[in-house]
Image: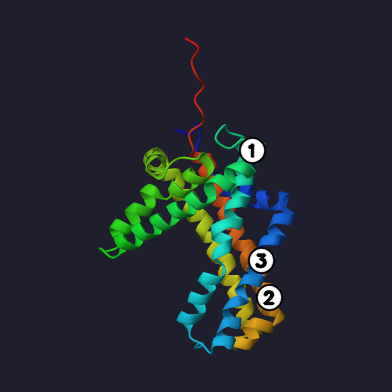
Amino acid sequence: MPERSPAPLQILATGFTHLRQHPGWTLAIAGITTLLSALGPLLQIKLGLPDDIITIFALRAVSVLPLELYFVPRFLMQLDAETLNRPENPAGQWQQNFEERWLKAFGARILLYLLVVAGLAFFVIPGVIVLVLFGWMPLRVLLRGEAIPQAARSGAAIMAKAWPEVLRGTMAILAVYLLLLVGLGWVLQQVLPEPTTRQRLTHPIIWITQALGGALELFLSACFLALYHAVEPPIQPSSSR
């Protein structure tokens, strides 16, 4: 169990520090988000797809998939190696570890999402329980190189011991994230209340908000990594006796 409870403000500050110390990564993710987000309206124009909310969100989710699949996990892998330098992910080997693990970690995330959706279909509560118990599973696969069954067990063990700290940290992270997201949406609403498909492809304010949104998503991931580091049990020194 962690020696001290992580302060929510400290978790947020650590997440911001991660981005501040890696401005190149932050700008790159913001730029990639802007480019990938343009694929949605581009496909709508080229294929004549309807301009409704379901189509917009579905195309965006598919367009930004490379971020969740590769770029953001790679950034988290580097942060983990630099911050903790644990034997499972040493600073001098994180790139090789990432190439070996990123696809497995993505598979673990897909499995988690499927289990959560299946649980939500049964009166919501089972889905929440699955998310609470196994939410750390994809990170365990990525950062610690564990197989999915082992990652599920170790992630659940962390939650069993540190769930109050995780709950407080998660609430603080999501509160700040949603506040910034709503503020970003409000600014966009003032400038461009009902953008057309072509405006979502070509208007500069859309590019700016997409870039800021990408940086905000990276901040969210960095904060959750900081929270995970705060509740992860330290490596136990081997006894010489």
Q: Quadrant of residue 41?
A: bottom right
- Which residue matches tag 2? 207
Mark 3 neighbour density, 10 Å: few (under 14) some (14–19) many (20 or more)? some
Q: Secondary structure at mark 3?
A: helix
Instruction: Please state which amino acid type lies under the numbered disc 3.
Output: Ile
- Which residue matches tag 3? 32
Percent from the top left, x then y, of residue 186?
Answer: 60, 77
- Which residue matches tag 1? 93
Instruction: Please state which amino acid type lies under the numbered disc 1.
Output: Gln
Residue 191 vertical position relative to residue 84 in the rendered view, above or below: below
From the viewer's perspective, is 136 left or right of 41?
Answer: left
Q: Is residue 140 visible?
A: yes
Question: Which sits earlier in the primary sequence, circle 1 or circle 3?
Answer: 3
**Going 52% across and 21% down the picture, which residue do you hit?**
237
Q: Is residue 226 visible?
A: no
**Going 69% across and 79% down the picture, which residue do you hit?**
205
Residue with the most extreme right position: 24
Q: Secondary structure at mark 2?
A: helix
Instruction: Please state which amino acid type lies under the numbered disc 2.
Output: Trp
